[in-house]
Image: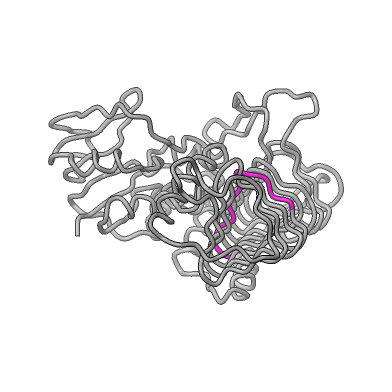
Amino acid sequence: MENIVLFDTPERHCACLPITFTRAVSDVRVGISTIKEKWQHYLPGEYTALTADYLAVKYPALPAEARFVAGHVCPDAPLAEAVARLAYGSALVGYEGELLAFAGSRADFDARRFTATVAYDSPYVAIYAAYDIFRENGRELEKDFRRLTAGRTSQPLPESCRLVGEPTFPDGTPRLFIEEGAKLECVIINVNNGPVYIGRDAEVMEGVCIRAPFAACTHATVNMNAKIYGATTLGPYCKVGGELSNVVMQSYSNKGHDGYLGNAVIGEWCNLGADTNCSNLKNNYAEIKLWDYATHRFKPTGMQFCGLLMGDHSRSGINTMFNTATVVGVGANVYGPGFPRTVIDSFVQGGAEGFKSVPVTKVMEMAVRMMARRSKSLTDAERQVLQSLADNPYPAQK
């Protein structure tokens, strides 16, 4: 099979922190699938990632020759076809000359030495910053829904549940799809604004109200009486309760109790304690300014809504409050009364009264215990990544 390398530029990987502290951008979930999974559907091959140096331990060695594809770009059929048609030595460029793909040697790719350049003029979706994950989630969710369910038959909606809205899109595609093994009882599902996908062995408990677009991936759980607004994705094995709006949870993370979370991205192996509440709108309705890891300054975003961006293995205690546009690193433990600052480093614990550093070994011990509950283990590669982040909180994004 052909070698496919999903590459990050240093600028793009840094812009997607804290979610990409522990992964390439192509491993980010947006919609139902990760960006890598989308490409694997359209362009079969042997995949690896070219990303920040310290993350190389997580990915197979880079081949000498390959199709190099921008890892922050979400594909569709026309874009994948354009990439597949590239002749050896040729590059595909998009908006403002952005490099989308190159077919050839690693040496020529690194040197940006192209024998020909092909312009791609059709629109495409790309993740340029961490907040784009929730901003683009609705559009990507519908694309993934249509791709994953095409030509397949959904399990029936149980009689105790109620579907609100037209059951199909104008082209006849069903708006609701329930995979085998999924469990739903006494659930209200409103599909007026898009599709709803209930993944294999997922469970949606009694009293839950869902407004599309929404996806509960494999083994996800929605606890009783939860209120979920689109566009929201629960990654595999995530568990939620309370109120959510436009949230993307990567996988294996929990927000199992009451409390509000909106316009947010949550990494893997996170836990938000009972009654954790996250503001997503400043009470003076001012423009959101978000921490920029590249400049170590707050940067205007042009947005009015932004909630919590949380890296892997971080958590909050009960009754924690997060202010608008709070960024939390990896392995942080936030608790106590009041609003903590809106930039929380990795490997710290505390709250509004201040933070103190936590040894990375303690974070690893906590991760091992949490992962063991799901029959998972912390790999040597993941340990190396966490150690690298502890040694250098802002690794060079080469």
The residue range painted magenta reads 227-237
Which of 119 and 16 lies nearest the eye of the viewer? 119
Q: Nearer the viewer, residue 326 or 34?
A: 34
Q: Nearer the viewer, residue 24 or 366?
A: 24
Q: Is residue 137 left or right of residue 45?
A: right
User: Of 353 and 212, which appears nearest the observer?
Assistant: 212
Q: Quick check: 385 above or below 8? A: below
The question of residue 258 being in magenta is answered with no
Residue 271, visible in the rendered structure: yes
Q: Quadrant of residue 143?
A: top left
Quick one: which residue is furthest to the right in this view? 337
Q: What's the residue at 56%, 77% (across, down)?
A: 375
> Is 231 colored magenta in this rendering?
yes
Q: Taking 244 as reference, is 281 above or below it?
A: above
Which quadrant is the N terminus positioned in?
bottom left
Look at the image and tell me whether residue 264 can be seen: no
Q: Position of residue 236 (x, y in %)?
A: 55, 62
- Residue at the location (65% across, 56% down)? 314
Find residue 96 and report its image quarter. top left
